[in-house]
Amino acid sequence: MYSTDLRTEAEKRALRDPALDSVDFLERFQARIDAGDVIEAKDPMPHGYRKTLVRQMSQHAHSEIIGMQPEGNWITRAPTLKRKLILIAKIQDEAGHGLYLYSGAETLGTSRAEMINDLLTGKAKYSTIFNYPAPTWADIGMVGWLVDGAAIVNQIPLCRCSYGPYARAMVRVCKEESFHQRQGYEIVTQLARGTPEQKALAQESLNRVWWPSLMMFGPSDKDSMHSSQNVKWKIKRFSNDELRQRFIDQTVPQAEKIGLTIPDPDLKWNEERGSYDHGEMDWSEFWSVIKDGGQCGRDRMAVRRAAVDNGRWVREAAQAYEKKKAARAVRKSRSAS
Ligand code: 3HC
């Protein structure tokens, strides 16, 4: 019922055409990509291209929606009215991002109901970062500075993604994320330059959030199963490790500027590379959070499940209204003829 997919039955059958996997078609498609063509919703595309886009875009949409939860918990506890207003506006932006992304993914022929079902049954993922709790106000600053900061680094190249609807959605998302990042950095700066207790709160939060924020870029290149094909198809423009390095290089000076210490004893400027060397990530933690989000993950999913259950009557009422309206239109046209 959410679906904005307006394809006819014949068009839907055409999406399953085996010719879309023929060597000849794959070569012609790759030539379009290499020439810098933008692929649009009704263009023929290989099944793999469509499938990986639905996977990535729906995961991205789920992350935006689930990411509202840790921040939502802080609306009533935000320290001032101004902070509360900013937080509410930011959370609304995240909801909007989720909706553009679900709509964008629907253009590929998968309905929103299917995508949400995949999330609820555990088939689809959402970003691991949201399976960590946000117990202090400093965490809300870190979500903006580091989590939204990492999201921008990852998502700016997606504005040039070969799939038009995704690329166009990302332009606005990135502009809004950039505001989110700045307001987060401002919260952290205020704490870092505040009382010793406030500075300690900011440092303690940075110690917890730093490594999980680096994990947002995905597994290392050698373990990334989708990167090489998706770079070839120009869905991704850079590898996971390249983007992670870019984020580290731009974030370390920001931490230094406000007197906070990045919790990585191996972090060191490498003059030759013009980049920071950094310590190894705890990949076992990354894979285990993907596999099992723990109590935090169970809580996040319980909220999503309740939202789907509690909203069912609204969807059913809207459907009943649409049916009634359509029947009325038929009666009217019959009586007019
Ligand atoms: N959390 C959860 N799953 C992750 C992950 C993470 N941090 N990083 C990778 N994975 C998953 C992948 O989805 C894939 O699993 P799948 O086959 O079931 O989908 C598997 O681990 C292997 O990873 P790959 O490197 O092969 O996967 P990708 O090539 O898709 O790269 C990605 C992963 C970099 C996250 C890429 O999908 C991407 O750029 N996605 C778009 C951006 C996005 O989803 N961002 C979510 C961040 S949160 C956000 O934007 C909300 C904002 O408010 C902060």
Image: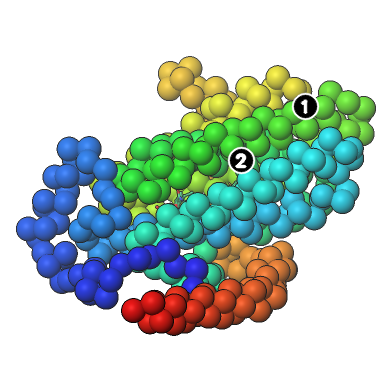
Residue ID at (56%, 26%): 250
Q: Nearer the viewer, residue 226 or 241?
A: 226
Three-letter amino acid code at disc 1? Thr
Residue 286 shows up from this direction: no
Q: Position of residue 75 (x, y in %)?
A: 82, 49
Q: Position of residue 265 (x, y in %)?
A: 65, 34
Tell me, what colour scheme is on the image?
A: rainbow
* Corner quadrant of residue 290: bottom right
Name above or below for residue 80 compared with residue 88: above
Residue 189 image label: 1
Q: Position of residue 252 (x, y in %)?
A: 62, 27
Residue 277 image label: none
Question: Does mark 2's beta carbon lie closer than 8 Å to ligand 1?
Answer: yes
* Corner quadrant of residue 36: top left
Category of crowding for the residue at label 2, using alpha-carbon neighbours closer than 10 angstroms: few (below 14), some (14–19), many (at least 20) = many
Per the image, the residue denoted by label 2 is 148
Quarter occupied by the C terminus = bottom left
Q: Position of residue 316 (x, y in %)?
A: 59, 79
Q: Is label 2 in contact with label 1 (beta carbons under 8 Å)?
A: no
Q: CA distance from mark 2 to mark 1?
A: 16 Å
Residue ID at (62%, 53%): 95
Three-letter amino acid code at disc 2? Asp
User: Is 50 positioned to the left or the right of 93 in the image?
Assistant: left
Name above or below for residue 96 compared with residue 11: above
Q: Nearer the viewer, residue 298 or 337?
A: 337
Name above or below for residue 159 compared with residue 335: above
The secondary element bearing badge 2 is classed as helix
